[in-house]
Image: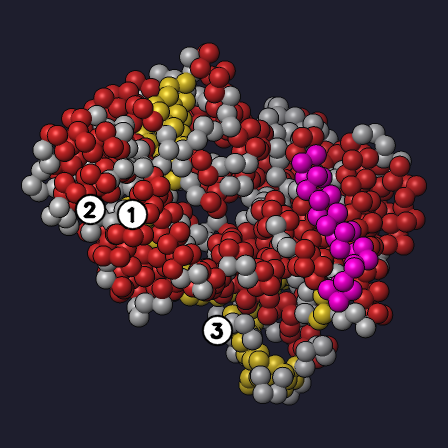
Amino acid sequence: MPKVPTHALVWSGERGVYELRPADPLLSSVVPGEEEPWFAWVATHASFSFQGQAARLNVLKESRLRGSGYWYAYHTSQGRTRKRYLGRTETLSLARLEETARMLVHGSGAAQALDQGMELLSSKLSPPRLPHSFVKRERLLAALDEALATPLTLVSAPAGFGKTTLLATWANLRPMRVAWLSLDELDTTPTRFWVALIVALRRSASLSPQFGNTVLALLRSPQPPPLSSCLSVLLSELESHQVHPAPLVLLLDDYQMIDDPVIHQSMAFFLEHLPAKVHLILSSRVDPGLPLSRLRVRGQLTEIRGNDLRFGEVEANQYLGQMLSPPLSAEEVQRLLSRTEGWIAGLQLAALTLQKREDRAAFLQVFTGSQRYLLDYVQEDILARLPAPVRDFLLYTAILSRLEAAVCQAVTAEPSIAASQQMLAFLERANLFLVPLDEERRWYRLHELFREALLAALHTTHPEMVPLLYRRAADFYEARGEWAEAITHRLAAADFSAAVRLMEQTVEQFWVRGEAATMAHWVLALPEVLVRKHARLLLTTALYLLNTVTLTTGEQRERVHTEVQQLMARVETALQPQSDETSYQFSVPHAGAVFPPENLEARAAEEALLLRRLRLLRLFLVSIEAPATGEGERLSSLQQEMQELDRDEEIIWQMVPLGYNFVLHYTVRQEGARLLSQLLDAKRQVNQSGSHFATIKVMQWLALAALEAGRLRLAYEESLAALDLIKQMAGYALLKGYFEIVLVEVWYQWNRLEEAHELLQTTLHDAAAWQQLDLLGGGICISDAGRDSQRSVVGGTAGTARGGTAGAA
């Protein structure tokens, strides 16, 4: 296989074609939509360079067993090479190559999802640097030491009481193993929360960098198991690592960001089963949604609250003495302490103001030290005294939860990244409520109270700048492929059209990495006018959301079904006759076309499509629940209607009738062999679609049906190709088990017992970690691995896979 491609397929915008350079006698250019000559050419070559409209990449064909081969795309940037599976020759359509180029270069897919944003995440995984002026509060440090006798310590107080500084001091001073995580508004879905928490744990000294890999893969699967099952694996792994004599402390700062009941429930489960050597500390402005009363009664909770955190006279005198010269008199300190009631943020504000005041007595006379006063005073005094460039920098970057020179430069339009870095360093030296988050002083955050005051001032003084600033931030994150941040800022800017564009582009990616619920949350928040224009997005989101519930608990299924029904209800409402007919219009997302009211034929066709998809979703719900409730034959009575609905142009919607048919014949009637012809036809279609969702579904069904039909070679090839694809995607952890089990069964029937045994042990090693999940069903028993017992171990695989696909439409 050549290392350097000898031909390049290059997009020519002037001609509107792809030119082959150097030209080949059989092919000089390719016209989009007329690609037969291209497929004929590429079938006789093993490599080429692709320079498309989005980006460039190299495409190489890699050999496999018995002469078959698969194509892969490669892109190298800054010394790092990314690889993506493309499939067989018939998959190399121009559209597929363009999409792959865009994904590899600009960031996409589950394989990169964990890497993307990790630099940002790293700023959340260490205690903030201690401020220049702080008080070492021995009484509270001792209280935290004693708190390790209980599983949970709650540090609960309003903003500005020094919670984070206290915990950062304690974490820096104590020679114990601390895993730190600062939470923010992007950590509010279960998948993101638990992924961030596991990454924090693996940063602690005693846990390996591979800690939690299994659970990370499960959480980022399109069809994740119940959270309680994932957490059982995580807890088991924590238990097995308890060899260090010192306790492991997991410290979550700013837990008030979490408002999802599912996260609270999973945290309660985690806490209930926490190993003895692991201790949890939560810092929050409000009491979290955990069973605190029960923990108090059991003596399993230590609490540090606002009254404990207030500065006393000695602490206030020490703190103010570090910041002011000449120092205040004892009477002045007492007056400030009385006015602020020991509120540390109020004392800090007073000290910053007194540094620039000669009339100290006059200031102390009017200073109240309340939070409302702080907010007003920041706007009226501190900001007013700052140079205009510094003031504007603070106001503009207040929209960011975390500050780094590059994103600050993008938002403020500073002349260079270096200028933004210098500004951040100046603000830190000026003690303007800027908290450094790493030793390199690259990442910072504003004190939340100060940030609130800045945002209020921004909306008051520069309201016209607010949407522009959010759009700049969104542009920055979009260019880096950090889709969650980009979409969040688009929504904050009320730039709904651009937000919807990103959602339409990334909805499958969020499903791949287990975040379909995040997409559903955004889509449900769209205004009604966007619902009418982008109804397809709502139904597509509902489809992906339903494809997360196969192995979840009844409670999780009910929650997902509720959200799906909300999405469907919004579309149904939009389909009702409108009083203002001029506002009633739908658009086709991919074409971007809007149907005006006078184009009744186009509008009627769009309405018919939406109604058909609504019905498909309702039947999908039936196919999920019927086998689990023993009503599988109910599917037969609805089969004719499902077949009549199988008229959709988009490949992901074609999967619904196909999956329905698979469940009926394979799971209910146990006659999956009859599906082979249909599934082979479907595979040819999905290979050209570029949809990972459709591709992996069809490969799963085809491998299982081929195994049941005795087509071992086909089952073997499909499983190898699927595992190859999964390896590139770093997702589909549960489906990986299906394909491995198929391979074990094939190798056993081929009498390749050593290979079967080796893979079986690998699979069962994972299953041993997953034993409380029952991921591969009850058909697999973890028992003696001797060859004589292999059939008893493997014999349940077909039934296992059969049961596991009950809701896999």
Q: Residue at x 90, y 54 (%)?
A: 644
Residue on which the image places disc 3: 4
Closer to the chain start, of discs 3 and 1, is 3
Vertical placement of residue 13 versus 84, above or below: below
* Residue 375 place in picture, x, y as percent: 34, 45
* Residue 470 place in picture, x, y as percent: 46, 60
- Chief secondary structure of the magenta span? helix
Q: Which mark is residue 274?
A: none
Front position in the image: 31 or 375: 375
Residue on which the image places disc 1: 377
Q: Residue at x 39, y 52 (%)?
A: 455
Front position in the image: 549 or 409: 409
In the rendered structure, the answer to whether residue 648 lies left or right of residue 60 reads: right
Quadrant in which the C terminus is drawn: top right
Residue on which the image places disc 2: 353
Residue segment shown in magenta: 558-584
Labels 3, 1: front one: 1
- Sort mark 1 into few (<14), some (14-19) or many (20+) by Cα contacts within 10 Å: some
- As measured in the structure, the alpha-carbon distance from the residue carrying label 1 to the one carrying label 2 is 10 Å
Q: Residue at x 37, y 19 (%)?
A: 302
Q: Kindly check if marks 3 and 1 are in contact, taking CB atoms under 8 A apart as contact.
A: no
Vertical placement of residue 516 versus 98, above or below: above
Q: Kindly check if marks 1 and 2 are in contact, taking CB atoms under 8 A apart as contact.
A: yes
Front position in the image: 98 or 427: 427
* Residue 46 place in picture, x, y as percent: 59, 71
Q: Quadrant of residue 637?
A: top right
- Sort mark 3 into few (<14), some (14-19) or many (20+) by Cα contacts within 10 Å: few
Closer to the chain start, of discs 3 and 2, is 3
Q: Residue at x 39, y 25 (%)?
A: 154
Q: Secondary structure at mark 1?
A: helix
